[in-house]
Image (tube, rainbow, N blue to C red):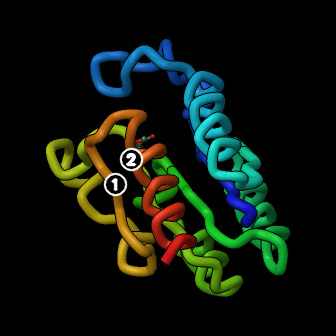
Amino acid sequence: ANILVLNGPNLNLLGTREPGIYGAETLSDIQQQLELLAQQHSLTLSCFQSNNEAELIDAVHAARGTVDYIIINAAAYSHTSIALRDALTAVAIPFYEVHISNIYRRESFRHHSYLADAAEATLSGFGSYGYSLALLAIIKQLQS
Ligand code: DQA
């Protein structure tokens, strides 16, 4: 199976960005861990990060017909982007929504996600482990 991991704006700064909230790991640390887990389960994993809404939408469109599951941390676009939500529902690829921080413990403008009710599940507040948990959930799904 093919898994696509999408990360939105400012997540390229992980490791140095508000480490008290987002932790010390970099995005490439996280991606390496996911790649290892994917290899162990014979999955093909690709990762893409962009600070640009249109590029994320294009990446979702390009996934149609090739990708079986998407893991997405849309970052601030989670709270703003109907367009990204529409892209995900248009391609009808099941997706898991990840937030490193617990968005419900933070400012009220982070409490709503346009992706949440279209997602298989949302993992919020598990730190970078949320991505691995999402991948483990996909592995379980594929085995059942
Ligand atoms: C985030 C939470 C969002 O509210 C924020 O805009 C981010 C990161 C998280 O991973 O906790 O950029 O998605």
Q: Nearer the viewer, residue 123 or 54?
A: 123
Image-quarter location of ligand 1:
top left
Q: At 18% across and 52% down in the image, what residue appears?
A: 104
Numbered tag placed on residue 60 in the rendering: none
Q: At 29% across and 52% down in the image, what residue appears?
A: 110
Which badge, 2 or 1, is on the more N-terminal residue? 2
Residue corresponding to mark 2? 99
Say if mark 2 contacts mark 1, CB within 8 Å: yes
Cα distance, mark 2 to mark 1?
6 Å
Which residue extends farthest left?
Answer: 105
Q: Does dot 1 land on a helix, a strand or a loop? A: strand
Residue 56 horizontal/vertical position (percent): 71, 57
Q: Three-letter amino acid code at disc 1?
A: Leu
Residue corresponding to mark 1? 123
Residue 44 horizontal/vertical position (percent): 76, 53
Q: Residues within 10 Å of mark 1 (few under 14, many from 20)?
A: many
66 up-or-down from 28: above or below: below
Q: Nearer the viewer, residue 87 or 33?
A: 33
* Mark 2 sits near ligand 1, with its Cβ under 8 Å away: yes
Q: Residues within 10 Å of mark 2 (few under 14, many from 20)?
A: many
